[in-house]
Image: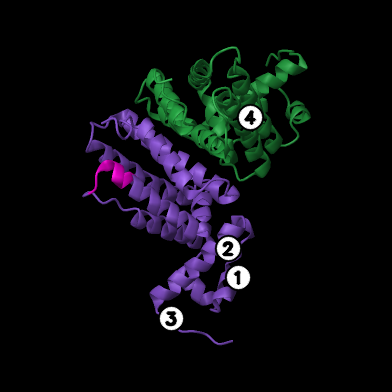
Chain colours: A purple, B green
Amino acid sequence: MRRTRLTSERRREQLLAIGAGLFAERPYDEVWIEEVAELAEVSRGLLYHYFPTKRDFFAAVVRAESERILRLTEPDPSLGVREQLVAGLDAYLEYVQAHRTGYLVMHRAAVSVDEGIRAVFEESLAVQQQRIVDAVATVREPDEAVRIAARGWLMFVITVCLDWLERSAVSREQVRDLCARTLIAAVEMEPAGQQ
Amino acid sequence: MRRTRLTSERRREQLLAIGAGLFAERPYDEVWIEEVAELAEVSRGLLYHYFPTKRDFFAAVVRAESERILRLTEPDPSLGVREQLVAGLDAYLEYVQAHRTGYLVMHRAAVSVDEGIRAVFEESLAVQQQRIVDAVATVREPDEAVRIAARGWLMFVITVCLDWLERSAVSREQVRDLCARTLIAAVEMEPAGQQ
């Protein structure tokens, strides 16, 4: 067995990518951390050095995916609010298609019994919610209703994307347009062409 | 200790109501079925007669709440699609306010690790989704996008309602209007006054 020497950061990334694959395929209880070591061709000791417990490992996988998606959908405040929305949705859907497993794992975390793991998902939801509130604030005063609508809409998008991944019954453009018009209605921005 | 004799159906309802209260207050693992017997002033044997395990008991609590909400929001096909939507939302929000604990328990089931329990929630979601598709079908041909939009919107409503229960930051009318206009946009019905 030939072992490749990787830098510590690259090794960590490799382990997380393997983890994303396994956790996306199977329920948490059916993933063994020993398998990850085997697939990565490293010793269990090395794996435990990076991630002391399976829970730590799963939390790190979820955090990595969640950071990646937040980075990819970073809003560009030089754009108008509508363009920001479309650009953000395009980047998001691009990620969902390209990183199917990571996306599934992240949303498995949303329904985890482990509060610490759910918290990773909740934090990322809070960041996205605040981004929407900030974008809306450039066109109208955001109130409590906008905050609630933004949070509801994020769960709408996740539900739609999971359905889309599972059944591929609609096109990416349909998903984008569906999500865009729904947010515009939810936060009460005027539909395009009426402003 | 004075014990009240109840008919078997009434006893079952009483036990389920006590369960809804306990499961809404605490995580599943911190609810003891013995407590339920104590609060109902019945023997553990009697409780086990109705519900052999805690899992059976929890599933029955969730099923009871889920059936109640489906019954309360039964659509009236003699109404127009918009009136059906508003009437359904009003009944739904009425339930959410009046049966806060039942609502919380039902949505705790949505994130249960137990597939059988999640299935109870999923079934109720599927019924609501089909109702929306049927209502939309009276005004336009429903396609895959409508099915997906309806499911996404149901998760939107649940998210909004849980936030509303938790923080009471908006009024019931605001919640209703938010949910109504969001569905109209999601399934691409023309907004009122434009048809």
In the displayed structure image, the side of residue A40 where residue B44 appears, left or right: right
Disc 4, SS: helix
Return the mark for residue A22. Answer: 2
Please report whichever mark, 2 or 1, sits nearer to the chain's N-terminal start: 2
Residue depth check, mark 2 versus mark 4: number of the one nearer the observer: 4
Q: Which residue is mark 1?
A: A35
Q: Which residue is mark 3?
A: A6
Which quarter of the image is occupied by the C terminus of chain B?
A: top left
Q: Residues within 10 Å of mark 4 (few under 14, many from 20)?
A: few
Please report whichever mark, 3 or 2, sits nearer to the chain's N-terminal start: 3
Please report whichever mark, 3 or 1, sits nearer to the chain's N-terminal start: 3
Disc 1, SS: helix
| Vertical arrangement, residue A14 with respect to residue B88, above or below | below
Tell me which residue sits at (34%, 50%) in the image: A87
Q: Main secondary structure of the magenta part?
A: helix
Tell me which residue sits at (24%, 37%) in the image: A137
Residue A129 picture quarter: top left
